[in-house]
Amino acid sequence: MTAAAAPGPTIDVHGITKSFGDRRVVDEISMQVLPGEIYGFLGPNGSGKTTFLRMLCGLLRPDSGSGTCLGFDVRTQAAEIKRRVGYMTQRFSYYEDLSIRENLEFVARMYGLRRRREAVDAALERLGLTGRQRQLAGELSGGWKQRLALAACMLHEPSLLLLDEPTAGVDPSARRDFWEEIHQLAASGLTVLITTHYMDEAERCHRLAYIAYGRLMAQGTVGEVIEDAGLVTYAVPGGSEPALLERLRSSPAVSQAVAFGKTLHVSGRDGAALEAALEELLGPERPWRAQRSSLEDVFISLMKRAEDNFG
């Protein structure tokens, strides 16, 4: 087995690109993820997140670009990377007519683990599955299927977890339990790259990146991403009327106006111009106040910019 490189970033890639036909799905993405880091990877459906993950774990070969994953070359050492990565796909991909234990035993054989029974027992215990080990996978709720999938990813003791929207369709309590487990794993030194559409999950990550139409639009801590966006936001109480939304969105100073419950978030990049527009459009009878832009405000703005960039 080829030895890994000296300790450094778990993921260190530059200019990674992938096309299918004439469509460039991943467009020169560069990224560094550090050991023990939980790195959030966000973006709309079809933005290239899954394709990027598959290139990192050796399932797809980049068309161009370079870099390493776990110290191995992403273009030439895919087999070495696969042995050391746990990859949890978007869709539940285990046998529904097998029990939890039978599924894990099958995965353990696929990895060629020598002490399969001990590995399966440990995975069942860690994910709280021991009491359900004889239950058929097809009978599990979304949260328990999620635990089974994570247990299968952890059987071979990987150094990196790639999790592709693992909490989609899972209730809030199960999502919270899942994230507690992820933080415990990261605290033990495991690196996690996770895709999600949930803003509360993004805020649980140490750092994150936003991708749209294959292009990396922003990356950094939550605070850095919000700060770098340069977005000024005002809250307008009771401002969800369709006519008002239409007037605001027609103003060149307003980059977006979005209803959040009974409050309207109005954002732009020129603070003075935005204030002037609000004074004109709202008048003195309707109050409005400055508000720190949220991560969701920023991501909606980035998505709109990406649509503009791609015509």
Image (cartoon, grey):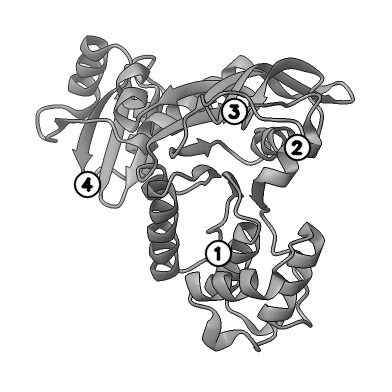
For label 3, the crowd category at 10 Å Cα-Cα, with few meaning under 14, some 14 to 19 and many 20 or more, is many
- Disc assigned to residue 169: 1
Alpha carbon separation for disc pair 1 and 4? 31 Å
Q: Position of residue 297 (x, y in %)?
A: 36, 33
Q: CA distance from mark 3 to mark 4?
A: 32 Å
Marks 3 and 1, the one that precedes in the sequence: 1
Name the residue tied to disc 4: 238
Q: Secondary structure at mark 2?
A: helix
Could you tell me the amino acid type at mark 4?
Answer: Gly
Amino acid type, label 3 = Ala
What residue is shown at x 78% (from left), y 71% (from top)?
A: 106
Horizontal arrangement in the rendering, residue 122 relative to residue 277 (left or right): right
From the viewer's perspective, is 191 left or right of 24? left
Q: CA distance from mark 3 to mark 2?
A: 30 Å
The answer to whether marks 1 and 2 mark residues whose Cβ atoms lie closer than 8 Å is: no
Q: Which residue is mark 3?
A: 212
Which of pointers 1 and 2 indicates the residue nearer the eye? 2
N-terminal-most mark, 3 or 4: 3
User: If you read the primary sequence from the N terminus, does the residue marked by circle 1 or circle 4 appear first?
Assistant: 1
- Write down the residue under mark 2: 80
Where disc 1 sits, the SS reads loop
180 on left or right of 115: left
Considering the image in quadrants, where does the N terminus appear? top right
Q: Amino acid at mark 1?
A: Gly
Q: From this viewpoint, is residue 213 visible?
A: no
Please tell me whether mark 3 sits on a helix, a strand or a loop.
strand
